[in-house]
């Protein structure tokens, strides 16, 4: 038996999203649908009387979706508009604050192979991405929900007149079009709440079956709306009370009028008690409680009137016929190819972590998304684990799995705490992502975060080169001075790096320099396995909407030359060399030195004074900004005329290209990747050794203080070089090409 229906036997599905004032979430819902792995589906979006920018969001998808309007804030009306516009054999409903698992429709479609099935739904995950919101649900004829165990077979309840019947959650429900039309679609009385429950009941009473497909997953944000707040407190109870009162009185009559009256009384008293509790516990104000209590009374009255009218009119059908004028048109099949699905692993991410690997991972993820790749980021949870789809990217914030660390520590000979336990958590999430159709995992050499993936034959792997433990060790004297730490942690990590480099099938490098250094230090050949793609970063001039000529014009005014150092105060970054350069200009008002990246403590300031003769308190031309936000850093790059980067080793040199993106030339040591980033005389100047850097930088800065034409030439040259080689768009395009090449070579799908 096959897992899914073959493509030729899979019925065409119309996915319907009904939206109201959720523009920011709507774009992600649509993007999630477009990543579905299903041979024939169309997307219908019905926008209610939204007052936000929902129409602008929908305009971006023009030609790829069916876009309709609903002029009233009534979910059942909106659903019927969607049904009327749908051309599929199956209609599947998704909320505007939800995202489907890529296999959602494939699982649902299996149910409809049985011609007696009128509706099918899956299990729904809540806004943590970890816990269930709803699994199987059974309702009675008063609209009360009951939750049986997952093993319960709901099919035994599928018979007309049943007191209990399977009910689906609206955001994870699908129906056979034939069945929906036969019962008249949705009843417009249900503006909110119980709309899908009413449909399920009428389908069962009409002889159709309702079933569950547990693997058909939806991730539901359960966002705020005009009905409820972000904390799920009711803003108004009126629509809900109308719906529940109508449902009880309309469908409960088969249970007897006495039970109907009791159910109505119980519901009313339950709501009033809940409102009182919320006020007593400070959750709502007395005025809010008064409003909610008023909603109960008004909603009850309107619901009773509506149910009485329905009884007099012998209403058994929904109100789909009211939308007969809607032209469904032809089936607007999504033509998006099934995307390459990639997981990037990085313990840190911006804005909490702006370090090299974290920032590179985020920029790469955004760029790959724009290249049509389905991107997942596996990162360390700051608090509770979660899964979210935001801005077209899946974020998997996970915890370490110490209970599974021993086996990995023994197999790969890495430290158990901090390494193997994290690897275990990563591999657990990768196993989950295989259900999404994961193709490739990319992880950094630092900490070898997904090392066991190298031994997984079901996925392709890429290890990216950055500064490693072996390359960092010469600049970390504290590692070697702590003998036990060195032998128990550093040495095993270097040995594991060596083993990984020897057998990783695909390696992503940011420079030839890092390849050469790795091959030399680890005595390993990467020939035929490594692909060089320089790092990229957003264009600061473009982001801040600054014309390069405006910067050049400012520089020509003759203001003091602004020189910036951006980096940690550690030996590898060469901050001491930058300070030596600054010391040579002490007292010169034509130049200003600014340091960003670390806040010097009293001991460091004392050392700076003793070793370099610099006192920020007495020198207006020397400023320490400390750690700053990303927007502040970008503003400093833009304001700077020159950036100093005397790093003693950089696998690449991200600071250099960030400076160049702001049209700021770089003075750097020609060591590591910097020799490939900075083009001497075009985007800055390179110096062969430390003394040459100090002397040469002094000479270059002295000349640039007066030769503003030369400074302008460097500004233009640095930005032109950035645009040609180091933009985030270029990086993402080349990495996507590399990933797809790997999939082509392995013969996998979706290359």
Image (cartoon, rainbow, N blue to C red):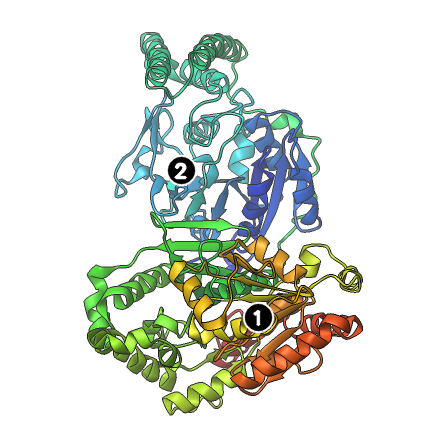
Where residue 186 sits: x, y (%)?
A: 54, 28
In the image, taking residue 554 as reference, residue 579 lies left or right, namely left
Determine the secondary structure under disc 1: helix
How far from the left and from the top, in percent, is residue 527?
48, 90
Q: In this figure, which residue is indicated by the disc labeled 2? A: 210
The image quadrant that residue 449 belongs to is bottom left
Q: Nearer the viewer, residue 293 or 310?
A: 293
Answer above or below: position of 170 versus 74: below
Mark 2 neighbour class, 10 Å CA radius: few under 14, some 14 to 19, many 20 or more: many
Q: Which residue is mark 1?
A: 582
Depth order, front residue of 347/596: 596
Instruction: Tell me how far mark 1 sits from mark 2, CA to CA.
Output: 76 Å
Query: Residue 162 location in percent, x, y?
Result: 34, 26
Tell me what residue is drawn at x 37 percent, y 81 percent.
474
Nearer mark to the viewer, of 1 and 2:
1
Q: Nearer the viewer, residue 234 or 238?
A: 234
Q: Is residue 727 shown to the viewer in this render?
A: no
Is 451 above or below relative to 209? below
> Hey, which quadrant is residue 637 in on the image?
bottom right
Determine whether the residue tagged by mark 2 lies in a helix, strand or loop.
strand
Q: Using the rendered image of the protein, determine whether residue 634 is visible from the camera's viewpoint.
A: yes
Quarter holding the N terminus is: bottom left
Q: Callout 1: 10 Å neighbours few (<14), some, many (20+)?
A: many
Q: Position of residue 122 (x, y in %)?
A: 40, 44
When the figure is inspected, residue 49 is found, relative to residue 329, above or below; the finding is above
Left-right relation of 166 to 706 = left
Question: Who's the residue at 63% across and 27% down the image?
Answer: 321
């Amino acid at each position: 038996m096959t897992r899914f229906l073959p493509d030729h036997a899979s019925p065409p599905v119309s996915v319907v999203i009904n939206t109201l004032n959720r523009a920011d979430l709507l774009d992600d819902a649509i993007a999630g649908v477009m990543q579905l792995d299903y041979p024939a589906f169309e997307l219908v979006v019905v926008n209610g009387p939204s007052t936000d920018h929902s129409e602008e969001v929908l305009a971006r998808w023009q030609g790829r979706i069916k876009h309709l309007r609903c002029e009233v804030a009534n979910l059942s009306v909106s659903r019927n508009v969607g049904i009327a516009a749908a051309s599929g054999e199956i209609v599947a409903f998704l909320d505007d604050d939800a995202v489907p698992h890529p296999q959602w429709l494939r699982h649902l479609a299996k149910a409809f192979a049985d011609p007696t099935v009128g509706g099918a739904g899956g299990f729904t995950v809540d806004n943590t991405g970890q816990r269930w919101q709803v699994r199987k649900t059974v309702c009675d004829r008063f609209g009360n929900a009951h939750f049986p165990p997952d093993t319960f077979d709901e099919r035994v309840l599928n018979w007309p007149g049943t007191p209990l019947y399977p009910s689906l959650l609206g955001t994870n429900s699908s129906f056979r079009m034939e069945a929906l039309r036969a019962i008249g679609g949705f009843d417009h009385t249900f503006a909110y709440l119980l709309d899908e429950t009413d449909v399920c009941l009428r389908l069962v009473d009409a002889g159709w079956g309702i079933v569950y497909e547990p693997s058909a997953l939806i991730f539901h944000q359960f966002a705020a709306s005009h009905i409820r707040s972000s904390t799920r407190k009711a803003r108004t109870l009126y629509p809900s009370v109308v719906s529940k009162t109508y449902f009880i009185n309309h469908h409960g009559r088969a249970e007897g009028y006495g039970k109907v009256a009791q159910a109505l009384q119980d519901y009313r008293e339950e709501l009033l008690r809940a409102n009182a509790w919320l006020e007593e516990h400070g959750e709502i104000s007395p005025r809010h409680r008064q409003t909610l209590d008023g909603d109960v009374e008004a909603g009850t009255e309107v619901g009773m009137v509506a149910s009485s009218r329905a009884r007099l009119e012998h209403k058994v059908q929904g109100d789909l016929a009211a939308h007969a004028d809607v032209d469904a048109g032809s089936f607007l099949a999504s033509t998006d190819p099934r995307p390459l699905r990639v997981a990037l692993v990085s313990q840190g991410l911006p804005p909490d972590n702006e370090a090299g690997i974290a920032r590179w991972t985020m920029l790469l993820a955004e760029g790959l998304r724009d290249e049509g790749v389905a991107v997942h980021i596996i990162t360390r949870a700051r608090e509770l684990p979660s899964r979210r789809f935001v801005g077209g990217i899946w974020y998997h914030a996970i915890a370490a799995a110490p209970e599974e660390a021993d086996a990995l520590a023994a197999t790969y000979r890495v430290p158990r705490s901090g390494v193997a336990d994290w690897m275990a958590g990563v591999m657990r999430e990768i196993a989950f992502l295989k259900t999404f159709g994961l193709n490739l995992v990319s992880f950094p050499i630092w900490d070898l975060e997904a090392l066991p993936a190298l031994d997984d034959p079901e996925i392709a792997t890429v290890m990216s080169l950055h500064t490693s433990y072996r390359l960092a060790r010469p600049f970390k004297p504290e590692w070697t001075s702590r003998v036990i730490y060195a032998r128990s942690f550093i040495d095993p990590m270097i040995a594991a790096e060596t083993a990984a480099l020897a057998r990783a099938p695909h390696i992503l490098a940011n420079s030839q320099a890092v390849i050469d250094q790795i091959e030399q230090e680890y005595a390993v050949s990467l020939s035929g396995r490594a692909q060089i793609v320089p790092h990229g970063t957003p264009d600061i001039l473009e982001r801040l909407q600054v014309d390069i000529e405006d910067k050049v014009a400012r520089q020509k005014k003759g203001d003091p030359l602004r020189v910036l150092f951006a980096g940690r105060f550690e030996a590898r970054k060469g901050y001491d060399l930058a300070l030596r350069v600054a010391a040579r200009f002490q007292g010169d008002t034509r130049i200003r030195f600014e340091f960003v990246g670390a806040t010097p403590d009293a001991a460091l300031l004392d050392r700076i004074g003793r070793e370099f003769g610099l006192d920020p308190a007495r020198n207006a031309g020397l400023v320490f900004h400390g750690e700053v936000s990303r927007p502040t850093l970008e503003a400093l790059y833009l304001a700077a005329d020159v950036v100093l980067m005397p790093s003693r080793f950089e696998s690449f040199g991200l600071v250099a290209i960030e400076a160049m993106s702001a049209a700021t030339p770089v003075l750097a040591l020609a060591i590591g990747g910097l020799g490939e980033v900075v083009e001497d005389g075009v985007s800055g100047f390179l110096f062969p050794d430390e003394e040459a850097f100090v002397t040469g930088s002094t000479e270059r800065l002295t000349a640039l203080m007066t030769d503003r034409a030369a400074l302008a030439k460097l500004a233009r040259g640095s930005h032109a070089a950035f645009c040609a080689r180091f933009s985030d768009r270029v990086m993402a395009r080349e990495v996507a090409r590399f990933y797809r090449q790997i999939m082509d070579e392995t013969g996998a799908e979706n290359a």
